Amino acid sequence: MNKQQNKFGNWLKTSLTARMLMIGVLIIVLLIPLSYIESLINERANRQESIVQEINEKWGNEILLYGPILKIPYKTYTEKIITSIDVKNNRTEKIEHLNYAYFFPTKLEMNATINPEEKKRGIYTTSVYKGEISMNGSYGKPDFSSIDIENEDILWDKTTIIIKTSNLKGINNQVIINFNNHKFSFLPKYEENNNNLSDEVSLNKLETNYLNKEVLPFTNDSYFTIKFNSSGSKQIRMIPIGKETNLTITSNWKTANFIGNFLPLNSDKISENGFNAIWKVLHINRPFSQEYFKILPNLKEYAFGVNFMIPVDEYQKSERSAKYGFLVISLTFLIFFLIQSISKIIIHPFQYLMIGLALTMFYTLLISISEHSNFLKAYLIAGVSVIILITLYSKSILKTFKFPLFIGASLSALYTFIFVIIQLENYALLVGSLGLFLILSIIMYASRKIDWD
């Protein structure tokens, strides 16, 4: 039995094939802790997302405004034939239906002053804001000619104005519309199907009581103004329902991210003190009408505005770096294998395993440090720590300074190469492919004179 063990041990020590098989097995084994590390990164990222969502919900979610919209009820009729045994007694019954027409403003001007601030919960940070929003504009005479409705079937005295918003909780004052010098308060109205959007954003309805018939735009345009204060988070967006929509957003936030179907017109929108963005959208620029009958459509996809989220991509970068873990371990083992083959120094499988575990420790250090610092500092600290550890450990194995210094320099170059790839977006694949080609060329050159027998 001892002879067989000694024979197997000598085979491991002397056979290049045995060493290569052993290294391959170790690399596969080390993929297990790497997969756990990737799961840890995803778990921490999900934890961050849930904490940020909790803060936003308590403060006030994003603001998405859809309105103001003139809502006018009207009657339509259908005929129903009531039959009897005697055909002569058949009669026709007229059935009345109540529908609603929705008219958008002829002109809509919106001005918002947004003052974001950072909110922290433990190690996680998000941006919230308080905003002052004013809306003013005008309505032209409602036109029912496209559906051929008689004037007596239009219930002018039951006309209301509605606003839909995603953030009722954040409104800090009573919302009042001044409509042709008459003031009307908005009240929340429950809608059974208020979550009619395709994503997580749902719109709640605010609606006035019935308007006085004399304020409606029968002969001249009717003008309105609305002002309200609101707390929110993430972003603020508007839907351009005016025949001409003008939006101005002013803020002291210096990292503005303009989102949606339309971008600001002014080129000097961003300054050292924040931004002042101006949009102008005409009805010809958007593919929807100025009036709708029976159903008010979901127009959320045409919203635009500003995102105030703090860009936190440490977890994304950590995940991308962990994807290169297999490459780092394989190349490091390959370097040790080449050194072992050239110098005839015996490296035990346990020593390979310790080196591999040290390489995986880089990623746990990277995640934990990046949660309390920026990614660059975390990468430097984790990289330098692991490189020093492996270099000193290889010194005790290889008994010389030449090879450990070479290993340290190789790991430094490898981690630098991976960091550059992580930072790049458009050229990551190109740079990565060229880098790997160069590494392969160097390894082929270094291994060209090895006696594989």
Image (spheres, rainbow, N blue to C red):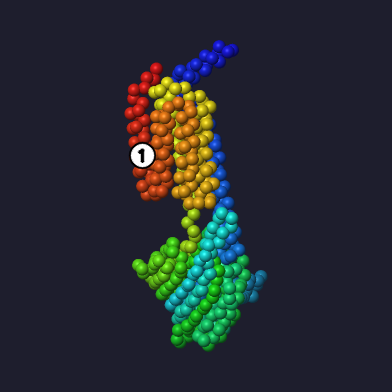
Splitting the image into 4 quarters, where does residue 336 fall? top left
Q: Where is residue 211 in the image (x, y as percent from the top left)?
A: 56, 83
Residue depicted at 59% across the width and 62% down the height = 57
Q: Nearer the viewer, residue 331 or 429?
A: 331
Residue depicted at 51% across the width and 71% down the height = 131
Figure disc tally: 1
**As drawn, which residue projects farthest toward the right?**
85
Q: Nearer the viewer, residue 315 or 365?
A: 365
Residue depicted at 41% across the width and 39% down the height = 412
Residue depicted at 43% across the width and 67% down the height = 274
Say above or below: 108 vs 440.
Answer: below
Q: Quadrant of the N terminus?
A: top right
Splitting the image into 4 quarters, where does residue 154 fall? bottom right
Q: Where is residue 368 in the image (x, y as percent from the top left)?
A: 54, 46
Secondary structure under tag 1 reads helix
Say above or below: 375 vs 78.
Answer: above
Q: Which of 110 and 449 is in front in this view?
A: 449
| CA neighbours of label 1 inside 10 A, class few (<14), some (14 to 19), many (20+) | some
Q: Is residue 408 left or right of residue 77?
A: left
Question: Label 1: which residue?
Answer: 435
Q: Where is residue 363 in the image (x, y as percent from the top left)?
A: 51, 42
Q: Which of 121 and 195 is in front in this view?
A: 121
Q: Where is residue 278 in the image (x, y as percent from the top left)?
A: 40, 71
User: For the residue marked with disc 1, what is the amino acid?
Assistant: Gly
Q: In which quarter of the image is the C terminus?
A: top left
Q: In this rendering, does residue 254 appear at all?
A: yes
Q: In this rendering, does residue 153 appear at all?
A: no
Say above or below: 51 vs 27.
Answer: below
